[in-house]
């Protein structure tokens, strides 16, 4: 398995006025954008164990670095238990560096699971990336996002 982070040269607009770049680890695709001290990361598809491991490698890579993290789950079809465990570890790691994690765009089923696991007490959950940026006090109207 190739663990290197492959970052695309180009960017695309997702139709929501958000310009995102593309990155891959193995066969797992992630979209991301860097705004001031925030990294917006959007996994594509099911967040199963393999994709969660790839997401962890990507988020902890030099591309993202120790930044506030917005995890945009609007394109994640579901999240399996390894994904929820990773969220707890990631929050603790970010907080140890004075950074925060916010979840944006979670589906109804993911939102319900976050509440059942009581993770919404640990991790703020908002409707969209714009709300997450405001919660983290990143640029209100970021250029290129």
Image (cartoon, rainbow, N blue to C red):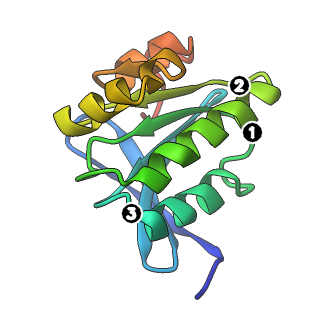
* Image quadrant containing the C terminus: top left
Dot 2 crowding, Cα within 10 Å, few <14, some 14–19, many 20+? some
- Residue 138 screen position, x and y as percent: 56, 17
Dot 1 crowding, Cα within 10 Å, few <14, some 14–19, many 20+? some
Of the pair 98 and 67, the residue shown nearer to us? 98
Query: In percent of the image, x 73 and y 25: which residue is there?
Result: 95
- Do the numbered discs 3 and 1 sit on residues whose CB atoms are within 8 Å? no
Q: Element at badge 1?
A: loop
Q: Which residue is mark 1?
A: 66
Q: Quadrant of residue 38?
A: top right
- Do the numbered discs 1 and 2 sit on residues whose CB atoms are within 8 Å? yes
User: Can you name the residue that lies furthest to the front here?
Assistant: 116
Q: Element at badge 2?
A: loop
Q: Is residue 54 above or below residue 100?
A: below
Task: Answer with left or right where residue 73 lies relative to residue 7.
Answer: left
- Sequence order check, earlier mark of 2 and 3: 3
Q: How many discs appear?
A: 3
- Do the numbered discs 2 and 3 sit on residues whose CB atoms are within 8 Å? no
Front position among marks 3 and 1: 3
Q: Which mark is residue 99?
A: 2
Query: In percent of the image, x 65 and y 41: which residue is there?
Result: 89
Task: Answer with left or right where residue 101 lies relative to residue 61.
Answer: left
Q: Which residue is mark 3?
A: 48
Q: Quadrant of residue 90?
A: top right
- Sequence order check, earlier mark of 3 and 1: 3
User: Can you name the residue that lies furthest to the right here?
Assistant: 97
Dot 3 crowding, Cα within 10 Å, few <14, some 14–19, many 20+? some
- Sequence order check, earlier mark of 1 and 2: 1
The alpha-carbon separation of the residues under discs 1 and 2 comes to 7 Å
Of the pair 55 and 49, the residue shown nearer to us? 49
Q: Which mark is residue 141?
A: none
Query: In percent of the image, x 67 and y 27: which residue is there?
Result: 37
């Amino acid at each position: 398995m190739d663990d290197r982070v492959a970052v695309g040269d180009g960017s695309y607009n997702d139709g929501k006025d958000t310009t995102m770049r593309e990155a891959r680890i193995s066969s797992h695709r992630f979209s991301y954008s860097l705004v001031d001290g925030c990294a917006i990361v959007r996994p594509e598809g099911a967040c199963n164990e393999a994709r969660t491991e790839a997401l962890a490698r990507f988020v902890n890579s030099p591309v993202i670095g120790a930044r506030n993290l917005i995890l945009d789950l609007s394109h994640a079809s579901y999240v399996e238990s390894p994904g929820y465990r990773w969220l707890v570890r990631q929050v603790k790691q970010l907080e140890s560096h004075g950074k925060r994690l916010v979840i944006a765009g979670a589906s109804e089923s993911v939102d319900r699971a976050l509440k059942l696991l009581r993770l919404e007490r640990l991790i703020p959950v908002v409707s969209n990336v714009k709300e997450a940026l405001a919660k983290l006090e990143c640029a209100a109207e970021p250029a290129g996002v």
